[in-house]
Image: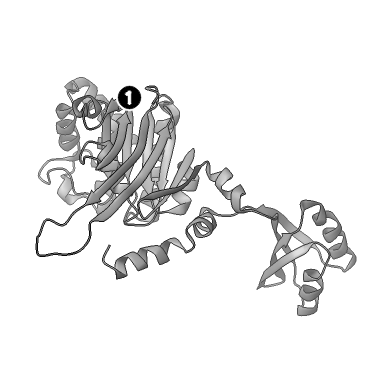
Amino acid sequence: MARDLAIETEHVGRIYRHRSRRKKEPPRTALDDVSLAVEPGELFGLLGPNGAGKTTLIKILTTLLLPSSGVARVSGFDVARQAHDVRRRINMVSGGETSGYGLLTVRENLWMFAQFYGLSSKVANQRIVELLEVVKLSDRIHTKSSELSTGLRQKMNVVRGFLTDPEVLFLDEPTLGLDVGAAHDVRDFIRQWMRNHPERTLLLTTHYMAEADDLCDRVAIINAGRVLACDTPSRLKLRIQQHPRFSLELTQLSEADLGWLGALPGVRGISHKPGDQRTVVDLTLSEEEVLGPLIASLHTRGVALLTLAKREPTLEEVFVAIVGSRMDEVENAGAAVGT
């Protein structure tokens, strides 16, 4: 394997065996033959439902777990044989964690963590001020962490991860449980940090489709411990888009108009959302060239086109096409069998 990759795994597996001799349950496979290669400077996403193996893989890459099989390296160092070298170059943030000491202020907590990594007080305090400003937490710098809301405490945890300027940063569900505003701030911070540090690498795990689509350069879809697909979000969408789709906002259509529109040559599918004085129609066409004659036909019929937008598949649709069911269905099925 090349040593210039930020993260690399070859046929990594992880099996959990029950310790109790009374239990006759078979071993549980958390990871099954996972091979990935992440380039330096890449924001790489692991997208999958709860229980898919995302957190297990991150724990292996951050030296918290040993793989049962295969090899994993971070910054060229083997996570099993060179764990100390790996730890010097990484940091990790998990969503929903309650790290920090409640009696210490935000600044004191962050300063303490900076000392664990050997940062000087001058550098640590400078970075703390800068990073808290970015995540809109400057006004809480002297607030005890026990007095912070869940969202604000998670912002502090995110700052802790970036504080040490790691070569490779692992974010495990960083927006889990956050409200819309706090999650937006965290994603903005991630984007800005990657722009300012193009040589750094970030691995993000999430089961939020929009988050992966919005942030990641490439995404690996993982389910039941196996990587089922890996590519850029746009290329993953192209894999399942057999026909072009468009959304048209039109003046209000009658049922007869909708029937006529659906029967036009080249229209393979139609759905609509009626509204006040307008109708939004989603069309699947045999090819893009059908769109021009279709719009001309609408004009001839006296139907005005208000807006037009090309639609691409969502990552949710990609997931369904690859896995065979929606993300929430997979999670519910896993919960039903106790995974």
In the rendered image, is residue 189 in sight? no
Seen as rendered, the residue at the extreme bottom is: 255
Measured from the top left, where is residue 144 in percent x and y? 15, 44
Dot 1: element = loop
Please tell me which residue is depicted at 21% across the width and 39% down the height of the picture. 66
In front of the other: 156 or 44: 44
Task: Give the class, few, some or many, for how many residues have Cα within 10 Å of label 1's Cα (few <14, many ≥20).
Answer: some
Q: Quadrant of the C terminus?
A: bottom left
Q: Is residue 162 above or below residue 45?
A: above
Measured from the top left, where is residue 158 in percent x and y? 29, 40
* Corner quadrant of residue 306: bottom right
Q: In this rendering, would 271 be left or right of 299? A: left
Q: Is residue 131 above or below residue 156?
A: above
Seen as rendered, the residue at the extreme right is: 300
Please tell me which residue is depicted at 48% across the width and 52% down the height of the picture. 210
Residue for badge 1: 76
Q: Quadrant of the N terminus?
A: top left
In front of the other: 250 or 297: 297
Measured from the top left, where is residue 260 in percent x and y? 82, 73
